[in-house]
Image: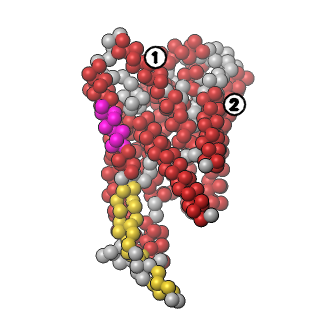
Amino acid sequence: MGELRHKVMFTLAMLLVFRFGAHVPVPGIDAVAMERLFQQGGLLGFLDLFAGGALKRFSVFAMGIAPYINASIIMQLLTVVIPKLGELAKQGEEGRKVMTQYIRYGTVVLGAIQAFGMSYWLKNMGVIPDFGVFSILIVVITLTAGTAFLMWLGEMITGYGIGNGISILIFAGIVAGLPGGVVQTISLIKVGGVNLIALGAFLIIAVVVVGAVIFTNEGQRRIPVQYAKRVVGRKVYGGQSTHIPLKLNQAGVIPVIFASSILLFPATIAQFFPAIGFANVIKDLFSPTSVVYNVLYALLIVFFTYFYTAIVFNPTEMADNLKKYSGFVPGIRPGKPTAEYIERVATRITLAGAVFLAFIAVLPTVLIGLTGVQTFYLGGTALLIIVGVTLDTMKQLEAHLMMKQYEGFMK
């Protein structure tokens, strides 16, 4: 229990550092002008959701972990296009270390580009009064260093804490905005800006959706497996029946995070050039409330669900392992037929999981249109991330406790 307590306390300490950094402002910023800019609404509130309020304050963590996510997406796509990177990804722990190093370099490069673009845009909006070379250099270096520090923070949580560090940071950023969302909703109720019946219906639907998300994340398709008996010396091995659990959603919340990061990119770039008419068209098209955005969002979620599942799930390797230990699926020949059968089953259940993720992600737009409750914190993207990260962290806690019980039993 002492080790688990240390991991939990370490994770909480890192989250405390994250929240502290979200309140440290970047030098040379007009805070009043930034506040006025956020009062206009639009895409900024959506971006600020993942930054945990850091963008609104324009703190050192204003860009959040987005450059790291984009670098990870680019690297995973390149493993399919470039054979050398694909081979590197299959080289076990050493290959993963090299890939991680490439992602780090990519994060810094993308972070610097995004920081410069954001600075240029804020200069046009009057948020950065002094746009000299030295001032802009300070802003770019500060924002890039903040993202690099968040990347390091996430890796520390993954290595020495509980859960996936990057997902935990995104989770913490979303949860940090919940109290403000609740206060805003209460204020709207007091002034009659929200219909109580509509709000009640919204909350009931949200509870049902949470249950559905948990059910889908925990859902499995169990493929029966039989092991043949083997006689080694005087002992008989095998002969038992078991199953291969294929999760309905093997990719977790990764497709949602990847899809939202990809779709935020065009609108973010368009905001840097408000004087260009075409940029305003792009900004409107990729607004989180537009039809084009939600259709592309759903399609990208389906794509990344299949893409990420293909990376983490290898039917051929699974079939080879079964054959190696004299296991077989009843009615299916070992080897290639077993791999094809497992792949066919995985493809079907992945489609169901991908469609469900896409449906939940675009559900907020439909609910806002039906109920008129203008709140994002009960929305699909935030909900999927919160529930997914919570379940994953709880499983890691349970696994750690179970391991300790087995160790105590062995002693």
Residue at the spot x=62%, y=44% of the render? Answer: 5
| Front-lying residue, 269 or 184 | 184
Q: Does any portion of residue 146 appear in the rendered image?
A: yes
Q: Secondary structure at mark 2?
A: helix
- The residue type indicated by label 2 comes to Ile
x and y percentages locating residue 381 in the rendered image: 42, 36
Residue under label 2:
141
Q: In percent of the image, x 60 and y 29: which residue is there?
A: 19
In which quadrant of the rendered view does residue 347 lie? bottom left
Q: Is residue 396 visible?
A: no
The location of residue 202, given as percent across then percent down, is: 31, 28
Neighbor class of circle 1 (other Cα within 10 Å; few <14, some 14-19, many 20+) is few
Residue pictured at 48% horizontal, 77% vertical: 324
Q: Residue furthest bottom?
A: 233
Looking at the magenta stretch, what is its main secondary structure? Answer: helix
- In this rendering, the answer to whether 389 lies above or below 202 is below
Name the residue beneath numbered marker 1.
40
Instruction: Tell me which segment is drawn in magenta.
Output: 204-213
Magenta stretch contains residue 212: yes
Which residue is outermost to the right?
Answer: 134
Mark before the other along the chain sequence, 2 or 1: 1
Residue type (three-letter) at the residue carrying disc 1: Gln
Q: Quadrant of residue 407?
A: bottom right
Give percent across and percent down for residue 76: 53, 52
167 horizontally vs 112: left or right: left
- Asked if labels 1 and 2 touch by Cβ distance under 8 angstroms, the answer is no
Most extreme residue toward the top, as rendered? Answer: 191
Q: Residues within 10 Å of mark 2 (few under 14, many from 20)?
A: some
Q: Is residue 170 above or below residue 76?
A: above
Secondary structure at badge 1 equals loop
Image quarter where the C terminus lies is bottom right
Q: Residue at x 40, y 44 (%)?
A: 300
